[in-house]
Image (tube, rainbow, N blue to C red):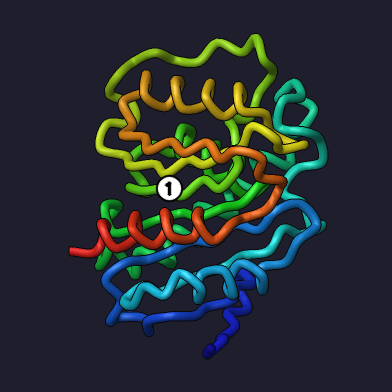
Amino acid sequence: MNLRTDPAPPLLESGAPKGQAKLGGILLHGRDRSREEKVVLASSFGVEGIRWLAPAADTGSWYPGRFFDPRAANEPFLTRAIGQCDLVVEEASEEGRLGPERLVMVGFSQGACLALEYAWRRPGRCGAFIVLTGALIGPPDMTWPSSGHVLAGTRVLLTGSDADDWISEEQTRHTARVLEDLGAEVRLHIYRGRPHIVTEDEMGEARTFLRGLIP
């Protein structure tokens, strides 16, 4: 695996070289995890033609609280993380050579929650999301927009579990319903008895999803 660094913003890069990639991929690590782990994950997909970029959270976490806390409790960190994602998405697009339909954001756990936050805060900038055990950020009573065109054309692979200690099956299903109400095309898979990890089955789902994005 060939790792390259980009000092501003700090990124790890792997996969297809700039200018030759068919897709641009953004990898978001989980709480207190590393971007290196996400690059290894991306290589395990085994899908050619994707240029992967992995940023790192300044403190090791994208935001300090839980995803279901009042949104104000995770600010200004959450907005700062979205700004960092903006920079990575811009780099992944290669000055517009790759349009939004050629960009995919992948996250696990906290990184998956951040990916969903990016999807609805920045609709249309990234066309696809692989959300490995994630949920929309906000308290249970939060009211979400119901306009069916906000995320029209956005494709989402969303996975979860009925035995995850961090994100419940109901929270995952609620996220799927909100995304669909916003117009996204959601592929939901709930695994039985799966702890807070990424399984080989999920890797296979992600692999198929990625291959479907390549023109």
Q: Position of residue 14 (x, y in %)?
A: 49, 80
Which residue has dot 1 on it? 129
Residue depicted at 75% across the width and 43% down the height: 63
**In the image: residue 42, left or right of residue 31:** left
Q: Position of residue 162 (x, y in %)?
A: 64, 32
Quadrant assignment for the C terminus: bottom left
Residue depicted at 24% across the width and 64% down the height: 214
Residue depicted at 53% across the width and 90% down the height: 2
Which residue of the protein is positioned furthest toward the front in this rendering?
A: 193
Counting every numbered tag in the picture gives 1
Q: Amino acid at mark 1?
A: Phe
Residue depicted at 81% across the width and 35% down the height: 65
Q: Position of residue 121 (x, y in %)?
A: 48, 34
Residue 182 quadrant: top left
What SS does tag 1 mark?
Answer: strand
Q: Nearer the viewer, residue 147 or 96?
A: 147
Which residue of the protein is positioned furthest toward the left in this rendering?
A: 215
In this rendering, the answer to whether 140 lies above or below 95 is above
Q: Nearer the viewer, residue 205 or 34?
A: 205
In this rendering, the answer to whether 25 lies above or below 2 is above
**Badge 1 local density, few (<14 within 10 Å), some, or many (20+)?**
many
**In the image: residue 182, left or right of residue 106:** left
Q: Position of residue 173 (x, y in %)?
A: 52, 24
In this rendering, the answer to whether 4 lies above or below 86 is below
Q: Nearer the viewer, residue 113 or 165?
A: 165
